[in-house]
């Protein structure tokens, strides 16, 4: 059994992460899950959420936007629409997006055709604010 996991995280635009890590957690469609070296192979979809990993005792956090997560032979492959490292998130911009999404949602009902669009925008903004806050606490 390997002592580390090899993680490759890719968006349609670039490779965001290529590291050997001790453990990784992410937000799947059915909830949060964690992976350690020696984990059984699996594939799951990811929803808007946080990905965290620990490397040499240091925790790192990222905000993700939809994708897939695969584990096989101590290699984790993450394919997502967008990924932002905590220290790269503009907190003020994320807070502004949160405010805009909240304002738009107030005037909509779940039956409105734009409801899901603003609901996803709200979820993305919330995750970005939470993850950016973790970088600020370092």
Image (spheres, rainbow, N blue to C red):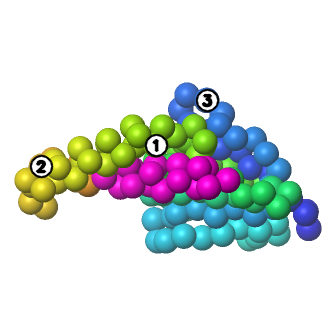
Q: Which of the marked residues, 1 or 3, is nearer the chain's N terminus?
A: 3
Query: What is the number of the mark on residue 14?
Result: 3
Name the side, left or right, on which 53 lies relative to 30. right
Residue neighbourhood size for the residue with mark 3, other residues' Cα within 10 Å, grouped as few (<14), some (14–19), many (≥20): few
**Residue, x 67% and y 49% (percent of image)?**
77
Q: Which residues are magenta?
A: 121-138
In the image, residue 61 sits, relative to residue 22, either above or below, namely above
Tell me residue 90's x, y (percent). Answer: 48, 37
Name the side, left or right, on which 101 lies relative to 32. left
Looking at the image, which residue sits at the far front?
Answer: 137
Residue neighbourhood size for the residue with mark 1, other residues' Cα within 10 Å, grouped as few (<14), some (14–19), many (≥20): some
Q: Which of the marked residues, 2 or 1, is nearer the chain's N terminus?
A: 1
**Residue, x 72% and y 58% (percent of image)?**
59
Tell me residue 109's x, y (percent). Answer: 9, 60
Query: What is the number of the mark on residue 113?
Result: 2
Q: Which of the marked residues, 3 or 2, is nearer the chain's N terminus?
A: 3
Query: What is the number of the mark on residue 91?
Result: 1
Name the side, left or right, on which 102 lies relative to 37. left
**Residue, x 53% and y 53% (percent of image)?**
133
Residue nearer the viewer, 126 or 112: 126
Please identify, in this view, whether the residue under mark 1 or under mark 3 is nearer the observer. 1
Number of numbered callouts drawn:
3
Question: Quadrant location of the N terminus?
Answer: bottom right
Query: What is the number of the mark on residue 2?
Result: none
């Amino acid at each position: 059994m390997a002592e580390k996991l090899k993680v490759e995280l890719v968006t349609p635009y670039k490779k965001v992460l290529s590291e050997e890590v001790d453990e990784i957690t992410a937000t799947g469609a059915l909830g949060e899950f964690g992976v350690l070296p020696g984990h059984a192979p699996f594939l799951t979809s990811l929803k808007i959420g946080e990905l965290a990993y620990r490397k040499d005792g240091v925790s790192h956090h990222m905000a993700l936007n939809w994708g897939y997560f695969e584990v096989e032979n101590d290699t984790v492959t993450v394919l997502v629409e967008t990924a932002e490292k905590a220290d790269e998130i503009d907190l003020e911009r994320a807070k502004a997006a949160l405010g805009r999404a909240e304002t738009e949602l107030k005037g909509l009902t779940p039956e409105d055709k734009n409801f899901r669009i603003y609901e996803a925008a709200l979820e993305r903004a919330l995750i970005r604010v939470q993850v950016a806050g973790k970088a600020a606490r370092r």
